[in-house]
Amino acid sequence: MQPDPVRLEDTRGWLVKAEKDLRSAEHGLSASPPLLEDVVFHCQQAIEKVLKGFLSWHDIPFRKTHSLEEIGRQCVNIAPTLKDLVDKAAPLTEYAWKFRYPGGMEEPTNKDAEEALQVSCEIYNQILAKLPFEARP
């Protein structure tokens, strides 16, 4: 049986956006000097979008939120094996806003950015592995 074309396109759309965020994060990390604020932002966004793509594939509605814990919890209800990864990702939620505005916030470190990129790539790959080939970008 063929998957619903609307659901397939919606899922693939989220995954394509997540992949672009990962590419942006990698590019920002390789810049000289590295664009650390952008790197951690794009890592958070990649995780958020890949998780939303997973929920879309499973036809699970989700709120408009940047909370990786909330979205991740919904994903863990579908695939309990994602729990450890979601737990690692949850602290990255604050990267959606923490460094995006002026106001005296410290900057992320190279280590923060590298760890965020590692977690986001790991989650992206784990989610892709749980989706059918036709849903992948």
Image (cartoon, rainbow, N blue to C red):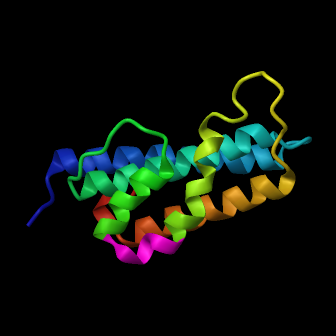
* Left or right of 77, for residue 47: right
* Left or right of 43, for residue 56: left
Residue 38 position, x and y percent, is: 72, 38
Residue 101 against residue 92 in the figure, above or below: above
Q: Which residues are magenta?
A: 79-84
Residue 68 against residue 63 in the figure, above or below: below
- Residue at 55% across, 44% down: 45
**The magenta stretch spans residue 11:** no
One can see residue 131 in this view? no
Residue 102 against residue 10 in the figure, above or below: above
**The magenta stretch spans residue 82:** yes
One can see residue 6 in this view? yes
Residue 67 position, x and y percent, is: 48, 45
Residue 65 position, x and y percent, is: 43, 38
Q: How many marks?
A: 0
Taking the view exactly as shown, the residue that stands out farthest to the bottom is 81
Taking the view exactly as shown, the residue that stands out farthest to the top is 102
Residue 1 position, x and y percent, is: 8, 67
Taking the view exactly as shown, the residue that stands out farthest to the right is 33
- Residue at 51% across, 61% down: 124
Q: Nearer the viewer, residue 134 or 74?
A: 74
- Residue at 30% across, 45% down: 62
Magenta stretch: dominant secondary structure: helix
Location of the C terminus (image quadrant): bottom left
Q: Quadrant of residue 51?
A: bottom left
